[in-house]
Image (spheres, helix red, strand yellow):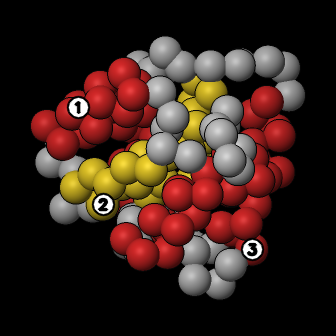
Amino acid sequence: MAKILIVEDNEMNRDMLSRRLQRKGYDVVIAVDGGEGMAMARSAAPDLILMDMSLPVVDGWEATRQLKADTETSKIPVIALTAHAMAGDREKAMSAGCDDYDTKPIELPRLLSKIETLLDGKS
């Protein structure tokens, strides 16, 4: 089954999302800030990354830009997750290199559909 890296600093969001994805059969690895997320993307080689955009150390925008600029991690699909759904945020996420965008609070069926679409495109 596919491995998903969740990069999320909010413990409640992390726990809820990881449990729900594991129940769907995904292998889940977790990072709590952007710096750790970039390191985990290299060491764990996930099939997909769920990237919170408001992170400590390195924010999700910069972490995504760096991952997409690195040949080792550039092909890993990234879905931006943000509670700050402002006009232009989707475009900002896509220009940072994200492959898709979703808002919080997370609607699992909608997010799963985006995850499956990106994973299908990878295989």
Q: Position of residue 20 (x, y in %)?
A: 23, 31
Q: Quadrant of residue 92?
A: top right
Q: Residues within 10 Å of mark 3 (few under 14, many from 20)?
A: few
The residue wearing badge 1 is: 20
Closer to the camera in the image, 97 or 32: 32
Badge 2 marks a residue whose secondary structure is strand
- Return the x and y of residue 87 as percentages of the image width and height: 84, 20
In the rendered structure, are the residues bearing label 3 and label 2 in contact, judged by CB atoms less than 8 Å apart?
no
* Of callouts 3 and 2, the N-terminal one: 2
How many angstroms separate mark 3 from mark 2 (CA)? 21 Å
The answer, for residue 95, to whether it is visible in the render is yes
Q: Which residue is drawn at the image coordinates 32% and 54% (left, top)?
A: 29
**Residue 83 as seen in the image, left or right of residue 104:** right
- Residue 52 is left or right of residue 30, and the answer is right
Name the spot of residue 97 as percent of width and height, x first: 73, 57
Query: Reading the chain from its start, which is encountered first: label 3 or label 1?
Result: 1
User: On residue 69, which mark appears?
Assistant: 3
